[in-house]
């Protein structure tokens, strides 16, 4: 690992440790009640307890399944729509206004409607996750494919390359960075979509656990522990996209 890469990893970790230390110190110094703001040590103990008694894994499992299904569906649809529109100027002119309208419409506001259509089960959460994933990836793919190097495309055309060959050998490799940038945004939004979908109904999931901790259980440390688990899930989702980008870079080289 290069020194620059180590620095980009160590600096955020040190900042996080500093903030946690300040948080712990202020809570202890000011004697803040645990139901208002638990100290990081209290959150860590509750996090470990929730894993030990099975509460966290029981609610984490359905969230991960919904995230994977929604992310895959939204990713495939978003990439297909974006690449298709990037290749076709006519289709792009027709569809672009609708993409803008869809992107400006808060998908999460459609959550109650999706729950009405699909019911309070996993299908509604998967649908919300897929929709919130689809649009940023579709727009990123559209722009990246559309803006491929025209000189390279013209050279390949003059050499008799088919549209499929130009897509596979020129457009997609040059669009890789833009597509993965959209995928990183979509990966983190997908977690938000699933959690909000779980808030709207269901019997299990991290969103449900947040509601339980806030409501009937009145367990503030559990709320923070669940938020930590959601953050870990978001970072994992983001990290998987980053790893996929690096692997694709090596394959292309």
Image (tube, grey):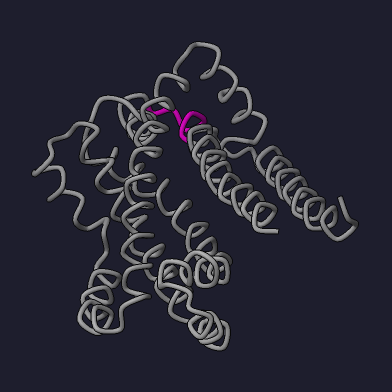
The answer to which of 123 and 158 lies nearer the viewer is 158
In the rendered image, residue 221 lying in the magenta stretch gets the answer yes
Which residue is rendered at x = 58% and y = 66% of the image?
Answer: 177
Q: Residue at x 21, y 50 (%)?
A: 111
Q: Which residues are magenta?
A: 218-223
- In-image side of 176 versus 122 (left or right): right
Instruction: Residue at 70% x, 40% y: name it.
Output: 24
Which residue is the extreme one toward the top?
A: 53
Q: Is residue 210 left or right of residue 250?
A: left
Instruction: Looking at the picture, tell me which residue is in the foreground, 126 or 245.
Output: 245
| Residue 79 forms part of the magenta stretch | no
Instruction: Left or right? Give the position of 176 relative to 117.
Output: right
- Quarter of the rendering containing residue 7: bottom right
Q: Return the residue found at the far right.
A: 3
Residue 82 is situated, as x and y percent measured from the top left of the image, at 36, 67
Q: Quadrant of the C terminus?
A: bottom right
Q: Position of residue 219 (x, y in %)?
A: 44, 27
- Work out which residue is located at the far left of the displayed protein and give it: 117
Is 114 left or right of 149, judged from the image as shown? left
Numbered-mark total: 0
Q: Main secondary structure of the magenta part?
A: helix
For the point 34% across and 60% down, the residue is 80
Residue 198, x across and y down, in percent: 29, 38
Percent coordinates x, y for residue 40 in the rendering: 65, 35
Q: Is residue 4 above or below residue 117?
A: below
């Amino acid at each position: 690992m290069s020194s620059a890469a180590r620095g980009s990893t160590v600096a955020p970790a040190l900042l996080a440790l500093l903030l946690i230390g300040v948080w712990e110190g202020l809570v202890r110094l000011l004697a803040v009640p645990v139901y208002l703001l638990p100290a990081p040590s209290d959150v860590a103990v509750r996090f470990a307890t929730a894993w030990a008694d099975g509460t966290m894994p029981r609610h984490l499992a359905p969230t991960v399944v919904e995230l994977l299904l929604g992310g895959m569906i939204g990713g495939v649809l978003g990439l297909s729509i974006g690449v298709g529109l990037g290749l076709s100027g006519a289709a792009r002119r027709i569809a672009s206004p609708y993409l803008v309208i869809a992107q400006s419409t808060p998908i999460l506001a459609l959550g109650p409607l999706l729950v009405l259509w699909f019911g309070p089960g996993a299908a509604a959460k998967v649908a919300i996750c897929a929709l919130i994933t689809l649009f940023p990836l579709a727009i990123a793919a559209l722009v990246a494919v559309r803006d491929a190097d025209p000189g390279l495309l013209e050279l390949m055309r003059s050499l008799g390359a088919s549209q499929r060959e130009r897509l596979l050998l020129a457009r997609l490799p040059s669009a890789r960075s833009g597509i993965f940038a959209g995928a990183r945004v979509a990966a983190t939004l997908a977690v938000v979509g699933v959690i909000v979908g779980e808030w709207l109904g269901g019997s299990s999931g991290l969103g449900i656990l947040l509601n339980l901790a806030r409501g009937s259980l009145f367990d503030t440390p559990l709320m923070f522990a669940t938020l930590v688990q959601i953050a870990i899930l978001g970072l994992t989702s983001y990290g998987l996209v980053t790893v996929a980008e690096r692997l694709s870079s090596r394959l292309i080289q």
